[in-house]
Image (cartoon, coloured by chain):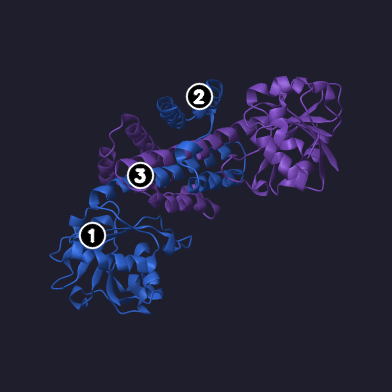
Chain colours: A purple, B blue
């Protein structure tokens, strides 16, 4: 039984808490938060505290707070044994300002309040300062997910960058598609199956192979015509730049 | 029973043929193709021909060929009654160079040989030159799909443009994410659940609401740091431009 203290009361903390309490291998000893109001969703099923000096003993202290607060929150865990980890994709392990053994437990997923996320399918990227702590953190990760990867701080930065491309930027392209539909009185619903199929393809085909469209075919006539339909200059710039990047990709490689 | 002649032997034609033969409301009378080799996948279950003068009578002639060939193929259907339609997203209805009544039957989906596409979920965008032909084409579309939309030629152009953003461009962002992972010796598999979740979100949340990440939060520190990790100049340009577009979107609207 791995004993855990959770520090933080946001989305990531709630998702971890739910998964830990469903696992027979993990015991959440306590949740720490800044206010009793924030702790309310937890307090019916676990001990909670707003007082740093009341933090109890555990095997792993998990800091699930905003990136800016990781360093400060790590300092309130004092005179404790065990491992201290944060859950951020974009923060170095050394941001943990604490004399304990350090690590990172980064769930690579977009958590929203609107949709239930199945944590079992979420890849956990883990790293520890000392190799002797790795097994414990790995055991914790495997208790809630089937996908656990060893990723060091440098790789984690690159992974975060890649995630910005495939998640933040793709979603913005959906938004631009939505905008174009709106202007033409077309329901965005028409595009939804296409969006799901485009994403679904990556399970069986590489994105390099899956590419279709006028830029891939170097069909200048269609490219020019579509470009001419765009009135907003930043949308035109995005169209031109991504078209060029696709053309370059297949110029080089075919 | 709607009688159909299919002209063309590519992916779209094959998908339509399979769907039509499974429908009790449609009878495929014939498939026309340029060569017997191309017609082979059809010839065991339907009459086929390579000779324009052998084309038989039908209610609807469906041209499923590359955009460039639509006009030429439409000219080989001669002295026939009925409706002639093409299946292209980016070609005006009037590209049909034929004296028959015209229409468009555009399945908005990306068809690949690698994955089976469930046509029932594919949105069909339909248009006819004369309103009296609309019901027939709608009946045909509903016989193979649950999603049928009336979309005129002008809207279809905008829809095609929007599809380039959400499909072609998103897939290219997946490719860029894959490239970043490769360079850092990270398996692209780690990103797959994130890609699927990002796409899946649109079923319950608008892309405007779903946006997350440093550009949405206007977190300049993280943006600068991630930008600094990119070495290829076109990737950096894409990062900068999409970040700016996201920032603009939420500057204006929040």
Quarter-of-image position of residue A68:
top right
Residues behind callouts 2 and 1 on a single chain? yes
Q: Residues within 10 Å of mark 2 (few under 14, many from 20)?
A: some
Quarter-of-image position of residue B48:
bottom left
For this rendering, which residue is in front, B157 or A163?
B157
- Expressed as whole percent of the image width and height from the top left, the position of residue A125 reads 68, 38
Pick whichever of labels 3 and 1 is earlier in the sequence.
1
- Of the residues tagged 3 and 1, which is closer to the observer? 3
For this rendering, which residue is in front, A28 or A44?
A44
The subunit carrying tag 1 is B
**B118 relative to A12, above or below:** below
Quarter-of-image position of residue A29:
top right
Position of the N terminus of chain A by quadrant:
top right
Compared across the picture, whether A177 is left or right of A62 comes to left
The subunit carrying tag 2 is B
**B82 relative to B171, above or below:** below
Pick whichever of labels 2 and 1 is earlier in the sequence.
1
* Residue receiving disc 1: B70
Give the Cα distance between marks 2 and 1.
48 Å
Label number found at residue B162: 3
**Point 31% across, 32% down: residue:** A232
Give the Cα distance between marks 3 and 2.
26 Å
* Residue receiving disc 2: B218
């Amino acid at each position: 039984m791995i004993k855990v203290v959770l520090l933080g009361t946001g989305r990531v903390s709630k998702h971890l808490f739910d998964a830990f309490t469903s696992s027979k291998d993990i015991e959440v000893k306590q949740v720490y938060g800044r206010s009793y109001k924030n702790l309310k969703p937890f307090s019916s099923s676990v001990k909670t505290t707003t007082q740093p000096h009341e933090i109890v003993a555990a095997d792993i202290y998990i800091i699930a707070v905003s990136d800016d607060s990781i360093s400060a929150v790590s300092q309130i865990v004092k005179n404790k044994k065990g491992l201290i980890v944060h859950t951020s994709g974009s923060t170095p392990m050394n941001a943990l300002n604490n004399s304990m053994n350090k690590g990172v437990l980064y769930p690579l997923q977009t958590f929203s309040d609107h949709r239930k996320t199945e944590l079992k399918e979420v890849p956990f990227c883990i790293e520890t300062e000392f190799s002797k702590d790795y097994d414990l953190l790995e055991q914790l990760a495997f208790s809630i997910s089937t996908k656990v990867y060893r990723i060091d701080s440098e790789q984690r930065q690159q992974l975060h960058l890649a995630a910005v491309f495939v998640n933040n930027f793709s979603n913005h392209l959906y938004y631009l598609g939505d905008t174009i539909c709106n202007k033409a009185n077309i329901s965005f619903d028409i595009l939804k199956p296409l969006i799901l199929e485009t994403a679904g393809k990556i399970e069986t085909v590489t994105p390099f192979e899956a590419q279709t469209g006028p830029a891939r075919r170097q069909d200048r006539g269609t490219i020019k015509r579509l470009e001419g339909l765009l009135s907003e200059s930043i949308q035109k710039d995005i169209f031109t730049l991504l078209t060029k990047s696709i053309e370059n990709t297949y110029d080089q490689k075919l």
